[in-house]
Amino acid sequence: MASIPRQTSLGSNGGSPPAIPDERKRKRMQSNRESARRSRMRKQKQVEDLTGEVSRLQIANNQLLQSIGAKEQAFVQVDNMNNVLRAQAMELTDRLRSLNSVLQIVEEVSGLAMDIPEIPDPLLKPWEFSRPVLPAADMFLC
């Protein structure tokens, strides 16, 4: 089998046709370089954007953690205040019951009719409690 001689692209053969493929190859290589450069720049920008987003998210996360900590402290304070108020309500309810029993004795002894209201238990039926105890408006502000 005979081999077919190929023309070299050195341009030393004196023809312009080898220069055209070389020019195309050079343009394609240049285009590929530019495309690779743009791709690297896009990737670098994506990395920078993601790094910035990570930083922003870490800052937001830290702020949320601080806010949660402050809310937990406020909750503990409110819970402690509620416990104190419950104890005071129970004590006042017991006093009121005691006073009502004294009034009943006075009513029986004196014969005078007295209006002695029934005492609702605020812990068993909080909806019957006449005035709800609300926390201060600025208690939860940090």
Image (cartoon, rainbow, N blue to C red):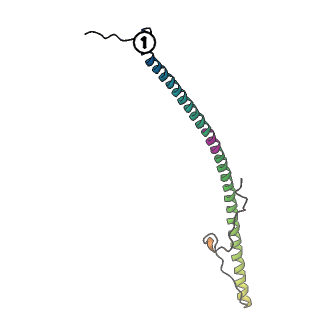
Where residue 8 sits in the image (x, y, percent)?
40, 11
For disc 1, the marked residue is: 15
Residue lying furthest left:
1
Is 36 in front, or is 106? 36
- Residue ID at (69%, 80%): 101
Where residue 71 sits in the image (x, y, percent)?
66, 53
> Bounds of the magenta span?
54-61
Is 58 in front, or is 70? 58
Q: Is residue 53 left or right of residue 8?
A: right
Mark 1 crowd level (few <14, some 14–19, many ≥20, 10 Å Cα):
few
Secondary structure under badge 1?
Answer: loop
- Residue ID at (67%, 47%): 66
- The amino acid beneath tag 1 is Gly
- On whether residue 140 falls in the magenta region, the answer is no
Placement of 83 over or under 24, stated as above or below: below
Residue lying furthest bottom:
111
- Residue ID at (33%, 10%): 5
- The quarter of the image holding the N terminus is top left
Is 45 in front, or is 6? 6
Is 34 in front, or is 64? 34
Q: In this view, does 138 lie to the left or right of 120?
A: right
- On whether residue 55 falls in the magenta region, the answer is yes
Where residue 3 sits in the image (x, y, percent)?
29, 10
Q: In this view, does 4 lie to the left or right of 91?
A: left
User: What predominant SS class does the magenta segment belong to?
Assistant: helix
- Residue ID at (70%, 80%): 100
For residue 133, which quarter of the picture? bottom right
For residue 108, which quarter of the picture? bottom right
